[in-house]
Image: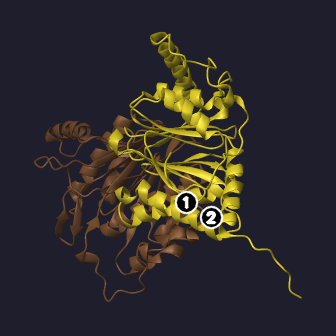
Amino acid sequence: MNHLFTNTGSSSFTEFLGAYAPNLLPTRERALAAPVGDQIPHATTIVAVTCAGGVVMAGDRRATSGNIISQRDIEKVFRTDDHSCMGIAGTASMGLEVARLFRVELEHYEKTEGRSLSTEGKAQRLATMIRGNLGMAMQGLAVVPLFAAYDENAGKGRIFSYDVGGGPYEQHDHHSIGSGSIFARGSLKKLYRPESTPRDAVLACLHALYDAADDDSATGGPDVTRKIWPVVAVITEDGFRRLPDEEVAELVQSMLEGRMTDPEGPTAPLR
Amino acid sequence: MSMPFGYASPEQIMRDRAEYARKGIARGRSVVVMQYADGILFVAPNPSKALHKISEIYDRIGFAAVGRYNEFESLRLAGIRYADINGYTFNRNDVTGRGLANLYAQQLGMIFTESIKSLEVEIVVAEVGETPNDDQIYRLTFDGSVFDEQGMAVIGGQSDAVAGRLKERYRDGLPLPRALDAALAALTEPGGERPPSTQLEVAVLDRSREHRKFLRLTGARLERLLAEAAAAAEQEAEEAPESPESGEEGTAPAGDRTPPTAPEGDIDTGSPE
């Protein structure tokens, strides 16, 4: 531990980890014997929507290994610091590890420098971490995050997406990742209202996840019998807030009631 | 051509180093770390907005230091690295104040015995627990001695005088405004003016907070708290009008008024007062 004191280094925890204990970094093995894609759990759909004074992110709770549902209540949306969160799609285990490392990365900078990273800075750091996993992604262990943050300088919510090679790509209004994302995105296109209240934005996310689950077998819908609801995070000026289960349950129930009579959900006006 | 050099006994060398470190530390102002009802309070007179004496190390762990800035800053950074790497390797709950205090003790002790100059720092590592009984406050001196403090710790130049004043006012489970009032009264010389909010660095480890317990109190929030502290002081004075130590009455012995000097005595042996 002694060179902790002499090696001043930079404020990046990832760089420090790479020099000090590279074995703890999310794995960068050169080659696997064979692609293992279908045999390990995959996390599926994440949606994010900007709203008045912030941003909302929601994720379903299903993880699949091929055609098997490997977990019904996995959590895929993580608080990364007071004003940001990330959701993961792709190889679940690697996604969890990247989320854990990213959280420490942001905190480490904040503690050593006495200030938070800028929103762009956070998005860039995440891109570098994802790029580091490119070799594994080519072997079938891809992990792709969605990053959302409240930008204190701009005073609004922002969304960044990535691909296996990194990024970030800033997205406007709304975005979605994972296997059900094409359906969720179509749904959000029609349900998105600029400058809506956070509550309405949450409802739009729940509808989008429902539509994704409707058409994508790997995305889980709300599990009414087991009372497993999507994970919903709202980030505003006041910081990150994960909605308690009761609050999500109430919104899901109202959505389900509407769908009882109208299974396709709300319709957008044609003209 | 060989240079003759004098012999100094190890005792002499250690004494000189301790003396040197004490003098350096005595030049700075004191920092108070104390328990209050919901956690641990840190108060430091510090006119600088950028150079902190108080810092967050990890979820439940805070750090306070006096002495040479560059020296305690490197200790602080090393502490953050130690905590982050352990929390990442194992679990966030596996980072403890005790482990950090041990790391610092080793480093300080090693530098004290092996380097020409010992570090001119005195630090506090505080960890807030689930209940007040689980709170821990460790004070570490320049030679690597660790003191497991109960309820409060004072470091820096006039630490004895400040600790004396703080002991008079300290109670278990004080609400935050009263605790802040007690700390400010202790940090203010009898009859002196209390520092304004711009000259203060105040932070808490608040056990009721989620995720990270450390919170720096600045700006409007600190102003509000100072006003509450002043109100608490008045209320206290009303409740106990005969009590001599309320407010800035200046009843402390005249000896406390003399400017700070280096503490006398032998090197620290690690035994508490």
Residue B195 picture location, percent across and down: 66, 28
Disc 1 sits on a residue from what chain? B
Instruction: State which quarter of the image contains the N terminus of chain B.
Output: bottom right
Q: Which mark is residue B144?
A: 1
Q: Which mark is residue B112?
A: 2
Chain with colour yellow in the figure = B
Residue A241 picture location, percent across and down: 38, 41
Establish whether labels 2 and 1 are both on one chain: yes
The total number of labels drawn is 2
In this view, the residue in front, B157 or A98, is B157
Q: Could you say which quadrant of the image residue A23 lies in?
A: bottom left
Q: What colour is chain A?
A: brown
Q: Amino acid at mark 2?
A: Phe
Assess whether mark 1 and mark 2 are in contact (beta carbons under 8 angstroms).
yes
The residue at the point 53 percent across, 31 percent down is B166
The residue at the point 30 percent across, 87 percent down is A34
Q: Which mark is residue A53?
A: none
* Disc 2 packing (10 Å; few <14; some 14–19; many ≥20): many
Disc 1 on helix, strand or loop?
loop
